[in-house]
Amino acid sequence: MTRKRILIVDDEADIALILKLQLEDAGYDTLRAKDGGEALELLNRELFSLVLLDIKLPKLDGIQVLEHLGPALQNMAVVMMTAHGSEDVAVESMKKGALDYIAKPFSAEELLKKVERALEFDKTRKANYLLQHQLEDERKKMAAILAGMADMMVATDRDGRVNRINRATAEALGVDPDLPLGMPVEDLLTTDLPPDRLPCKVVLRTLSSCLDVSYSIHVRGRVIPVLSSATPLFGASGKLVGSVEILRDISHLKALEKEREEFVSMLTHDLKTPLTAVLGSVDLVRESRLGAINDEQKEYLDSATESCGEIVEMIDNLLDVYRFESGKMSLAFTEEDLAAILHKSFSSIRVLAVRSDITLSAAIPDDLPLLRLDRNKVGRLFGNLLSNAIKFTEEGGKIALSAGLVNNLTEIRRHIPPGTYQTEQIPHRGSFVMVEVRDTGIGIPKDALGSIFDKFVQARNRREGKIKGTGLGLAFCRKVMDAHGGLLWAESELGKGSVFTVLFPLESAGPVGA
């Protein structure tokens, strides 16, 4: 281990010798300077862990040496030596950068304690100095990152008061980036949300992240749509210190969405028009209005009509999914008998089931409670689920439709595959009507169960089924259940079939995620 070097600056040879012996016995290396000038030469040429500096020196006294050293004292430990009666001068020298002083005469024990304390203090001071430089470097890096961010950023304290914004926020809101902070965040952000629903306020209450919240900011007569996410900030002790919210301007996405809606609307219209003509022509031929047809011809015409119907269903699903997403879907909620809707949907697939040699069964109680729902949309939902079951169930398979009441969701929650819903979207209690569509078809891979309700998604093995689809049918079903405040999920095992479960709340809780 390297021995620490100490410079002894004293013009009295006997005192310098005593200091040398005491310090070297304690394990230090020493060097002596006879006056202030020699001390400065040594300090400029060599490194020392500590300087024992006498105040009374020839040429330059101790105070003058400190003044010559100036900023270099930040990297040097200096202990002043003073005779009795000059403590005031010693204190003055500490103001100029010395760490401590020791009054003559002093004992070896007192000297070593002062030296050890000064070295330890200097070590801590240097560590703090280094840490301050690192913190300053990190602060500059963070400032550069924030200045370069294209997204807006607002940071608050734990009371929801703004303590920092970035350049993008200042430019978007038309405020001074150095404006006096401390204002409530709702005074900075004028939005179409109640103040307590702002993501940065939500995370302060819940202590958990609030992700992908869409709302609009009103700025000088214009509206900026944003997609926002916020997260709580915790200090080193683990206590909440504030929150930070990132807001992305999605004006260009809204413009693209409008163009997409117009395109989808035009496309569906342009596709349905020729299909209507095709169906009309087929019906004229099938009804023998243009001449007699035989059974084989009728079978081909029925198949053509069925295929046209599937295309119309795909177009309707596409249009309705986009209507749901744009908030333009009009729903007619009325008190309805769900059992009657299920029986009607079940009856509509009997012909297909017989043709595919699939056994159907239903267990639907007649005393199911009335539910507030959109009869047409819910009917299409179960039509889609049952049609899917037919498509992906081999000949000789089975399809079962069942319904009933559930009051305990503890066991049911464990069946919802990860990724289907966020945890906070799944209720913990309440009464529900549960409907299951169970088949013995080809099944769905486990890693696809959380995504099959997304647009244009079909599980890999499902593409190998008897009929290929667009992946919009299940997306439509999910949108319908979201609008009814209910849940829809799938469970499956490859080669052993699937179960699609629909959960309607007896008391409507509003759309999922609201």
Image (spheres, grey):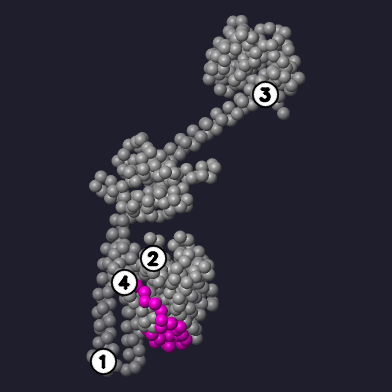
Instruction: Determine which quarter of the picture holds residue 341.
Output: bottom left
Q: Earlier in the sequence, mark 4 or mark 1?
A: 1
Residue 116 percent location from the top left of the image: 67, 23
Do the residues bearing badges 2 and 3 touch, measured as CB atoms within 8 Å? Answer: no
Label whose residue precedes the other's in the sequence (2 or 3):
3
Q: Which mark is residue 288?
A: 1
**Residues packed near mark 1 inside 10 Å, few (<14), some (14 to 19) or many (20 plus):** few
Query: Alpha carbon of mark 3 to alpha carbon of mark 1: how far?
Result: 112 Å
Rounded to the nearest angstrom, the CA distance separating label 2 from label 3 is 70 Å
In the rendering, at what x and y percent does residue 298 appear? 32, 90
Tell me the kind of residue under disc 4.
Phe
Q: Mark 1 near mark 2, Cβ–Cβ under 8 Å?
A: no
What kind of residue is marked 1? Ser
If you read the primary sequence from the N terminus, does the residue marked by circle 4 or circle 2 appear first? 4
Bin the neighbour count of mark 4 within 10 Å (Cα to Cα): few under 14, some 14-19, many 20 and up.
few
Residue occupying image coordinates x 55% and y 18%: 97
Q: Is label 2 in a helix, a strand or a loop?
A: loop
**Element on which disc 3 rests:** helix
17 left or right of 102 in image? right
Q: In what element is the residue under mark 1? A: loop
Is residue 481 shown to the viewer in this render? no
Disc 4 to disc 1, C-alpha distance:
42 Å
The boundaries of the magenta stretch are 345-373
Q: Amino acid at mark 2?
A: Ala
Mark seen at residue 509: 2
